[in-house]
Image (cartoon, grey):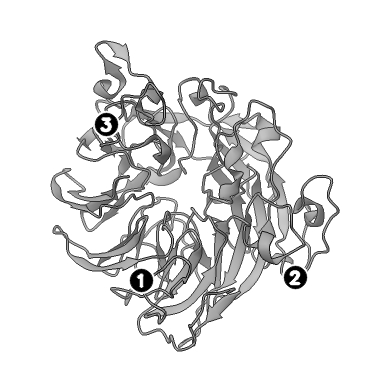
């Protein structure tokens, strides 16, 4: 349920964009993580507000009981980490199902999260798909954070939406849910949405509709760590995604080292088409969370994938499916960890020495620890370059990170020859960098926003928000929008830090804001705000669902 504020205009039909235009994603949709397959969070939307005032959450305290520039607000679960996506008048989000456990008896035992679809005009809930907790797991699998819910940003392609669930499934869903009937071949949603052994529910038009399901754990031997987290992109007839393969609970062993890290599925059927053959699991330390990206280099589509081994790989995109699954062809690789990040006194630096929680760790959590990093955000493709940010799981604490600018036109091991510049002044980061008008913006875990010259790596400014930051920035309407653990920030674009507003949120914003149809969509752990200039606010006195 959402508090609906008076809408001032009707919405046009969205046009799905897969590849970014020079000005950014078209302003009438944001259909997938990054807006397009290049994963560069830049939008052509104009007229966005410099500030907004959210509705007060009496329990946790935001700025005001009287919202400003808020069209509507929707109540989510208690955890939301992906981005909203917007297409054809609908807003899709992934969250957990804590709210369901308090206001519904249909899914009393569901703990695996949910996908929700809202009406873009008024924030009303159109449908939701509940994912039960995955309980039948090999004993060594450390998959305890399913309670984080669906961390994947849904990807919309025509009348289908693709998402990775908290239980690790890759699902193709009907954008209209059950409202237009239960389309197949998957027709067992009534059983799927409840824990195994529980009686099926009676489906309604407010439930989600699964078209097909692919399970990397059962089909490919993937073993998740913590949670399944990746956001897919679609190119032609194919779905590209990382597998979230990872280590065991004690962080000692990669449980399935030869399982694929990057896979390609047929978007119509869910059949496995291709996978990498790099055996990244033999070299990685922790897990795979980086969403892949795509760009056109020398007339050919390349897929860029950030590995849990700190290496970014470029593969040729799939042109045609074969009768049997095949291996992707590698074009180049680039190691994001220079020798000084890997070796100390001639010996490998233990990855988990940099985990502040370990009793043997020398990480003082002050941003100075030097050790190996992996890739968590997406590699960003722009103008024949790949921009790459390095970091670790935020639970490991602060440490030294890296930003790389890579020449995407080369082949082979391009660690040395392909490095156009690298920047060591940034701490570990989970964020995906953004390139707009010759500038690169990227925050680090400590909350510092770094602004560099995208061509040369020259540093223009480092602005400290003094608040832990997981998500990345959005550049739109000559502004830089960014959420942190405590605040939502708006900066003016440019080479100097110019803060337009700083808004206290009731819960942390771990995701990245997006824009579509003249509206800014901001998602915190518990709320989704639709923010627009001069939005009517006289009806907004309480939070949705309260």
Determine the image quadrant of residue 105: bottom right
The residue at which mark 1 appears reads as: 45
Residue annotated with mark 3: 418
Q: Which mark is residue 124?
A: none
Is residue 483 visible in the rendered structure shown here? yes
Q: Quadrant of residue 394?
A: top left
Ranked by sequence position, the earlier of labels 3 and 2 is 2
Q: Residues within 10 Å of mark 3 (few under 14, many from 20)?
A: many
Cα separation between marks 2 and 1: 33 Å
Q: Looking at the image, is 476 positioned above or below residue 409? A: below
Residue 61 against residue 269 in the figure, above or below: below
> What residue is shown at x 49% (from left), y 77% (from top)?
72
**Which residue is found at the position 25% from the left and 55% from the top?**
465
Judged left or right of residue 441, residue 143 is: right
Mark in front: 2 vs 1: 2
Element at badge 3?
Answer: loop
Q: Is residue 24 left or right of residue 455?
A: right
Secondary element type, mark 2: loop
Residue drawn at (65%, 36%) of the image: 216
Badge 2 local density, few (<14 within 10 Å), some, or many (20+)? Answer: some
Marks 3 and 2 sit apart, C-alpha to C-alpha, by: 52 Å
């Amino acid at each position: 349920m959402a508090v609906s504020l008076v809408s001032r205009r009707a919405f046009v039909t969205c046009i799905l964009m897969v590849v970014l235009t020079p000005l950014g994603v078209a302003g009438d949709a944001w259909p997938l993580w990054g807006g397009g397959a290049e994963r560069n969070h830049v939008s052509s939307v104009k007229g966005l507000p410099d500030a907004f005032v959210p509705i007060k959450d009496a329990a946790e305290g935001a700025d005001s009981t009287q919202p400003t520039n808020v069209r509507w607000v929707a109540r989510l679960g208690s955890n939301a980490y992906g981005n909203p996506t917007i297409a054809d008048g609908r807003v899709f989000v992934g969250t957990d199902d804590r709210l369901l456990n308090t206001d519904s008896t249909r899914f009393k035992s569901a703990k695996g999260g949910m996908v929700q679809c809202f009406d873009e005009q008024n924030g009303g809930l159109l449908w939701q798909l509940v994912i039960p907790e995955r309980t039948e797991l090999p004993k060594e699998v450390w998959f305890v954070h399913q309670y984080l819910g669906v961390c994947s940003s849904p990807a919309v392609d025509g009348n289908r939406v693709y998402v990775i669930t908290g239980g690790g499934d890759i699902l193709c869903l009907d954008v209209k849910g059950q409202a237009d009937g239960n389309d197949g071949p998957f027709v067992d949603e009534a059983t799927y949405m409840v824990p195994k052994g529980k009686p099926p529910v009676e489906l309604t038009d407010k439930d989600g509709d699964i078209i097909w399901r692919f399970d990397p754990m059962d089909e490919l031997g993937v073993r998740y760590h913590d949670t399944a987290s990746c956001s897919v992109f679609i190119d032609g007839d194919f779905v590209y995604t990382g597998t979230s393969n990872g280590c065991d609970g004690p962080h000692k062993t990669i449980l399935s080292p030869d399982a694929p890290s990057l896979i390609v599925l047929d978007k119509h059927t869910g059949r496995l088409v291709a996978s990498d053959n790099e055996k990244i699991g033999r070299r990685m330390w922790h897990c795979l969370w980086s969403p892949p990206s795509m760009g056109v280099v020398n007339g050919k589509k390349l897929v860029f994938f950030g590995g849990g081994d700190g290496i970014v790989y470029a593969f040729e995109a799939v042109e045609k499916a074969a009768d049997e699954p095949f291996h992707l062809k590698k074009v180049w690789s680039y190691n994001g960890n220079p020798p000084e990040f890997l070796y100390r006194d001639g010996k490998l630096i233990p990855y988990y020495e940099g985990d502040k929680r370990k009793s043997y760790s020398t990480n003082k959590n002050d941003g100075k620890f030097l050790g190996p990093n992996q890739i968590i955000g997406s590699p960003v493709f722009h103008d024949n370059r790949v921009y790459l940010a390095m970091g670790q799981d935020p639970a490991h604490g602060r440490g030294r990170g890296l930003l790389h600018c890579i020449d995407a036109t080369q082949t082979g091991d391009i660690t040395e020859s392909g490095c156009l510049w690298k920047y060591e002044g940034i701490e570990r980061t989970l964020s995906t960098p953004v390139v707009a008008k010759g500038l690169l913006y990227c925050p680090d875990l400590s909350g510092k926003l770094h602004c560099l010259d995208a061509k040369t790596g020259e540093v223009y400014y480092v602005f400290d928000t003094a608040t832990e930051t997981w998500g990345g920035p959005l550049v739109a309407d000559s502004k830089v929008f960014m959420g942190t653990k405590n605040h939502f920030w708006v900066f003016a674009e440019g080479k100097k830090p110019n803060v337009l507003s700083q808004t206290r949120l009731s819960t942390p914003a771990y995701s990245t804001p997006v824009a579509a149809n003249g509206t800014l969509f901001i998602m915190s752990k518990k709320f989704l705000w639709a923010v627009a200039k001069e939005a009517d606010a006289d009806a907004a006195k309480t939070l949705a669902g309260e």
